[in-house]
Amino acid sequence: MAGTRRETATKREIERKYDAGADGGLPDLRGVAGVADVIDKGVAELDAVYYDTADQRLAAASITLRRRTGGADAGWHLKLPVPEMEGARDEVHAPLSDDVPRALIGLVRSRVRTAELTPIVRLRSSRELRHLVDASGALLAEVSIDGVRADRLAGGTDATAWTEIEVELADDGDPALLDKVEKKLRKAGVHRSTSSSKLARALRETVDPAGGAALVPALALAPVEDSAGAQVLAYLREQRDALVDLDPAVRQDLPDSVHQMRVATRRTRSAFKSYAKFLDRAVTDPVGEELKWLAAELGVDRDREVLTERLTEAIAAVPRTLLLGPVRGRLKIWKVAGRAGSRRKTVAVLDSGRYLALLDRLDALLADPPLRKAAETPATEALPKAMLKDYGRLATRVDHALALTPGEERDVAMHEARKAAKRARYAGEAAGPALGNPADRFAKRMKAVQKVLGEHQDSVVAREALRHLAIQAHAAGESAFVWGLLYGREEAAAAARERELPGVWERASRPKVRAALGG
């Protein structure tokens, strides 16, 4: 969110957890390659209270939110998993306060929605800290032996205790060191923990006062089915999960996050349309309209980002002798003016009741799928028909665009063809798990068409921005020469894409691509 960067600090944490051996001690890690010394940093007493919803939505997503006192980093800590990196989490730190900081609430909003965050577990740890350093004394990793006591809150009296070892890589450290340390630990009889976090273990081993053993809610995987409906629903679940997972990244303004979130909305809408034969449109159409709204709101930020990158690269390619006037300064003013407003608007959208209601509607749709009778048809029979229907729609639009003379009307027609190519591509991607290589090849061909048409549309959009920049420069008494030069280059780029399209379309429309699908 807009205040997140000022109120919080984020670091990438890469660590591994181990169940301590019978003696609870560490082997001599100075024998690990690259480790010159192990420095005793003393003992710290840590007291952490973990927060979650009553139904443990954060724990189910392997997210932890705690308020901790003691040690060098007292405060609020939110830990978000990094799926592509083993043992990695992004830790967002906020100063100590009585209530959960608003910045952190925003980062978990897509998970908790309007549910209240309350204390669920208290962990008190006695931490023996060691630093692994190299020959120059530089920190390689921190190793801690934690004696932990966990108490369930909200009236619970049952507790559990254990000892564990954590090995956390230093900032910019070599992940290979963790493998070397683990090899040493294994030889000493110390093995990886079966719990992803202290909280997960505490929830598993304590008793919920409301009754029964408390387990972190499992994200049950639906059985693999070969029906068309099952395959489409699996794809829709992936997109819903992507929306929820990307929300905190967008709020933190992480690279490409807005684009990826927007793609998830488009893939969902595309699936609703491509596979409408299997889903009740009375349910999916209203949700699709809300997804269209969200994609448009996100587009304010993303489109400006892409366009700024394009214009910056274009200016960099202009010879210095031709850079007349304060071109870079003018672009910077344009960028900042648009960026400030779009960022505020994006975060406001993610905080809105309309957005949260959309997430709830997606959850409800997936929990009680509006499947039609046709959804029972085997996927290998039904999905190719839907894909070929999208192909036919694309073919009509491409033929129409190619029949027009260059100009505004053709630009519009090529943009419509681009949207059809994207829909056909997404239909192929959704069918991939069921159809395998034929669907993958189809999607790849459609993507190639989409790329050419997308580059053409990017040029159309860039030309409009360049025209406005030229007008602004002229009004300010600056030279508009460079903006006109870039406009001409964009016209040439668009013409090149128009010449390229027939060849790309010929390859994409070869009969064997469709024949592999049974069409």
Image: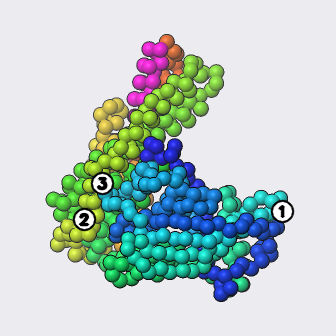
Q: CA distance from mark 3 to mark 1?
A: 53 Å
Residue 519 as seen in the image, left or right of residue 121: left
Q: Would you identify the image quadrant in which residue 367 lies? A: bottom left
Where is residue 326 drawn, in percent x and y?
A: 56, 20
Dot 1 surroundings within 10 Å: few (below 14), some, or many (20 or more)?
Answer: few
**Mark positioned earlier in the residue sequence (3 or 1):** 1
Tell me the residue at 65%/66% (across/down). 44
Dot 2 surroundings within 10 Å: few (below 14), some, or many (20 or more)?
Answer: few
Q: Nearer the viewer, residue 395 or 207?
A: 207
Q: Nearer the viewer, residue 459 or 166?
A: 166
Relative vertical location of residue 3 with respect to residue 317 in this rendering, above or below: below
Q: Secondary structure at mark 1?
A: loop
Q: Secondary structure at mark 2?
A: helix
Tell me the residue at 33%/81% (across/down). 211
Residue at the top extreme of this rendering: 477
Q: Nearer the viewer, residue 516 or 239?
A: 239
- Residue linked to disc 2: 364
Where is residue 459 drawn, in percent x and y?
A: 43, 36
Q: What's drawn in magenta, residue-wise? A: 452-476
Where is residue 139 drawn, in percent x and y?
A: 74, 60
Name the kind of residue labelled 3 in the image. Answer: Leu
Q: CA distance from mark 2 to mark 1?
A: 58 Å
Q: Secondary structure at mark 3?
A: helix
Residue at the right extreme of this rendering: 135
- Residue linked to disc 3: 356
Where is residue 389 drawn, in percent x and y?
A: 26, 59
* Magenta highlight on residue 472: yes
- Residue linked to disc 1: 135
Colouring of the image = rainbow
Name the kind of residue labelled 1 in the image. Answer: Ala
Look at the numbered discs 3 and 2 and tell me whether their residues touch, using CB distance below 8 Å: no
Tell me the residue at 61%/76% (across/down). 147
